[in-house]
Image (cartoon, helix red, strand yellow):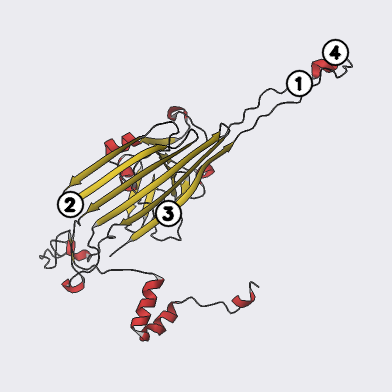
Amino acid sequence: MRVQAYRLGASLLALGWYGTSAAQSVSSTTPQTSSTDASQRVVLEEVIVTAERRHTDAQHTPLAATVLTGSDLTEMGVTSIDSLQFVTPGATVNNFGQGIDFNIRGIGKAEHNSQTTVGVVTYRDGIATFPGYFQEEPYYDVANVEILRGPQGTFGGQNATGGAVFVTTNNPKINGGFDGYLAGQYGNYNDFATQGAINLPISDTLAARFAFNTELRDSFYHVTGPNGGPYSGNPGKLRSYSGRLGVLWTPTEALTVLWKTDINNLNMGAYPADPYYHRFATIPGTGAVNPTQTDLFDITANAPQAAGRAQVLDALRRNPRNAGRVRRLRPARHPHSARGPR
């Protein structure tokens, strides 16, 4: 079984324009009719506007939140959204292969489909991810992660009934010099991973930052196809490749533009499938030894799955008799669709 996800996004994260405001002053040459008029004149010197989206101290912010810096993530071994449940009170994460069920205080999502909206929304650098899917991008070169518990509908949107997660990656630094890091690891199951980032100061107003993360690992499972035959799909090997490019431009003190884009190729081999009765040492209710019991990591019923227009057309070319079934899979047209809505 294979699940492969690509994610390519570009976001304009910050575009600020600030102007000045001043009250119109009365010319010194303007005739004054009386001292009463002079005392009633009001000069507006400064206007300050505030909103909830601002930098505040965590201890003075009126909400329940867990805030983790990039260093915290490294020390706690948090490398993906799955691990957040081990460092966040009241959070549970269920990874069902194709997506994520994220719940905080029992509120979130339990239905494994793209039509059902989530109750805990995840933002990556200010952009909401697809509800419940494509959230497995690894955490690398991260500045901080904020997990907000409780309803966050005001700033998190309608998909934040249970809470919201904000992941912010490191920004480029203008006049920050050439700075970066490189890390690697090797472990059992031939797990090999590399990660790194570099800051590129291009000019006094422009800087860029490039970061990458890769990990390759053999499968934990011994997989055979149906009826014990050979298995031709991915048996659970991890093949993860990610990269991110950020550009920061500050042409004036009044204008800041931050742009980021990232691309991911994540192939995790999906999730294993095996008959549930293989897990029992004895047959429930009888006490008899279960002759079909297998080890937890011996998977005997997997079969490769794929869906897409290319696969359907290829199957049709190979066997024209599939044409009838392919036609039945196509959605029926509304009888008035050619005329437009009625």
The quadrant the N terminus occupies is: bottom left
Residue on which the image places disc 2: 190
Identify the residue under disc 3: 8
Q: Which residue is mark 1?
A: 42
> Alpha-carbon distance for marks 4 and 1?
14 Å
Which tag, 3 or 4, sits closer to the chain's start? 3
The answer to whether 177 appears left or right of 204 in the picture is: left
Cβ atoms at labels 1 and 3 below 8 Å apart: no
In which image quadrant can residue 114 be found? bottom left
Identify which residue, 307 or 214, lies in the foreground.
214
Hey, which residue is sitting farthest top in the picture? 35
Residue toward you, 294 or 16: 16
Residue type, numbered disc 3: Leu
Q: Residue furthest front?
A: 203
Task: State how far apart marks 1 and 3 are (Cα).
Answer: 54 Å
**Label 4: which secondary element:** helix
For the image, the number of numbered tags is 4
Up the image or down, 50 lies above or below 153; here it is above
Residue kind at label 2, given as amino acid type: Asn
Q: Which mark is residue 35?
A: 4
Q: Are marks 2 and 3 in contact (CB under 8 Å)?
A: no
Q: Nearer the viewer, residue 292 or 199?
A: 199
Residue density around tag 1, few if under 14, some if 14–19, many if 20 or more, within 10 Å: few
Residue pictured at 30% horizontal, 53% vertical: 240
Up-down: is 329 above or below 306? below
Which residue is painted at 36% across and 58% down in the image? 5
* CB under 8 Å between discs 4 and 2: no
